[in-house]
Amino acid sequence: MIYPPVDKLISKVGSKFLLINVVAKRARQINETGHLQMEEKEYLSKKSVGKALEEVAKDLIKFN
């Protein structure tokens, strides 16, 4: 099973297009700065894209 579920993420963001853009931008930030919104051990994913998806699922990323 994919975590977090795509349906849950789209309901939080509004559209697939916006979800892709938000996650891609946040994943780049994680790669460049290493700054995380949660403790490293709280993430289920090891990759930056997965971590960005988890942050969206937990409402840690604000966007317009």
Image (cartoon, rainbow, N blue to C red):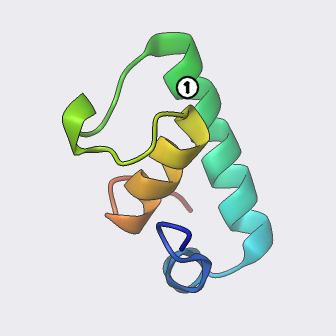
Q: Residue furthest top?
A: 33
Residue 64 versus residue 14 in the image, above or below = above
Residue 30 in percent (x, y) is at: 50, 25
Residue 48 versus residue 35 in the image, above or below = below
> Position of 32 compared to 43: left or right?
right
Q: Residues within 10 Å of mark 1 (few under 14, many from 20)?
A: some
Residue 56 versus residue 28 in the image, above or below = below
Residue at image coords 71%, 65%: 18
User: Which residue lies under the disc numbered 1?
Assistant: 29
Q: Nearer the viewer, residue 57 or 45?
A: 45
Secondary structure under tag 1 reads: helix
Q: Which quarter shows the C terminus? A: bottom right
Q: Residue furthest front?
A: 1
Residue at image coords 50%, 83%: 8
Residue 50 in percent (x, y) is at: 53, 47
Residue at image coords 42%, 16%: 34
> Position of 18 compared to 55: left or right?
right
The amino acid type found where label 1 is placed reads Gln
Answer yes or no: is residue 62 visible. Answer: no
> Position of 50 compared to 42: left or right?
right
Residue 46 in percent (x, y) is at: 46, 34
Q: Nearer the viewer, residue 52 or 21?
A: 52
* Quarter assignment of residue 15: bottom right
Answer yes or no: is residue 56 visible. Answer: yes
